[in-house]
Amino acid sequence: MEFLYTYETLKLEFPLTKPEEASFVILGVPFDGTTSFKAGARFGPALIRHATLNLESYVLDYDIDIAELPIADIGDVAVVAGDPRKTADRVRETVEEIKRANPGALPILLGGEHSQTLGAVEALRPRSYVVFDAHLDLRDSYEDNPYNHACVARRISELGVREAMFGIRSGTKEEVDYAEGKGIPWIHARDYSFDAFVDLVKPLPEPVYLSIDIDAFDLSLVPSTGTPEAGGLVFWDVIEAVEWLVENKKIAGFDIMEVAGENLGDITALTAAKLLFYFIGAMGSRGRF
Ligand SMILES: [Mn+2]
């Protein structure tokens, strides 16, 4: 099928299926227009796709070969350079196109700046937003732009979507006060535990949009990201949480954002690719496709 705003780029090497027939539809969002510290998120989708070449499609833990699952890769959204709102509009429209063609499809975004998650959430209208992130992202505006990547959780909160945040270790006093005022629960990275995750996520209404800002992981795992922070989560913390969510909640959409870098084989992209395979494997092994 034709999409208004996408173009084909490096694709996953699987036997891929058409988006109309796929259970998982992968969409790259190569945007890094508002990154304040370390650039390169525009290369995130390509780097993640390339990093998958290093991985076995058979996921040992789940005894499943994800290459046998119906996965589509529709390429990347053509970004509007420097304009996160207009680019997120294109993300929204593309995700709406996917859902119109195939209501059962689960969109998976590979980014690219976290600002672009807003477009997918606007299209999918989940009731809850579960996010792993080093940052609260609850600023009302940053550098005079309300669609800066530091504001994405605030914009999503304003849509009336319930939120819960994990791996946090950076924010302002104003963001903490906003979270408290709105009843948005968050767990600091140093206090993170699986039990704390389940306690917060269990009562959330479905469906849930799951967003993983790659900077939630400790920066030793993800050195190439827009705003790296020491003291993050280990790989299995996030995988166990993903497994619980897939098992217990209906998932409306999933993304892995803020992957940056300039070199093929970057550690950050390898972390993201492995996470992608675990997510799809967890869904597939539990019949969620
Ligand atoms: Mn972040």
Image: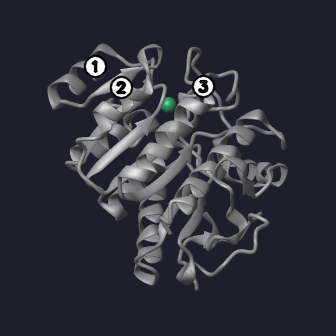
Mark 3: is the Cβ under 8 angstroms from ligand 1?
no
Residue at image location 66% in from the left, 43% down from the top = 272
Marks 2 and 1, how far apart in space?
19 Å
Residue at image location 52% in from the left, 37% down from the top = 240
Q: Secondary structure at mark 1?
A: helix
Whether label 3 touches label 1, CB < 8 Å: no
Q: How is the image coloured?
A: one colour
**Which residue carries the number 2 mark?**
196
| Quarter of the picture holding the N terminus | bottom right
Q: Amino acid at mark 1?
A: Val
**Which residue carries the number 1 mark?**
176
Whether residue 154 can be seen here: no
Decide: is 176 above or below 143. above
Counting other residues with Cα less than 10 Å from the Cα at mark 2, is it few (<14), some (14-19), or many (20 or more)? few
Residue 91 image point, x, y percent: 47, 62
**Which residue carries the number 3 mark?**
234
Decide: is 202 above or below 24. above
Q: Is residue 265 left or right of residue 105?
A: right
Residue at image location 63% in from the left, 70% down from the top = 71
Residue 190 image point, x, y percent: 47, 13
**Residue most extreme to the left:** 181
In the image, which disc is placed on residue 275?
none
Marks 3 and 1, how far apart in space?
24 Å
Residue 282 image point, x, y percent: 56, 53
Give the label, 2 or 1, closer to the camera: 2
Front-most of residues 55 and 19: 55
Image quadrant of residue 16?
bottom right
Q: Amino acid at mark 3?
A: Val
Mark 1: is the Cβ under 8 angstroms from ligand 1?
no
Marks 2 and 3, how far apart in space?
15 Å
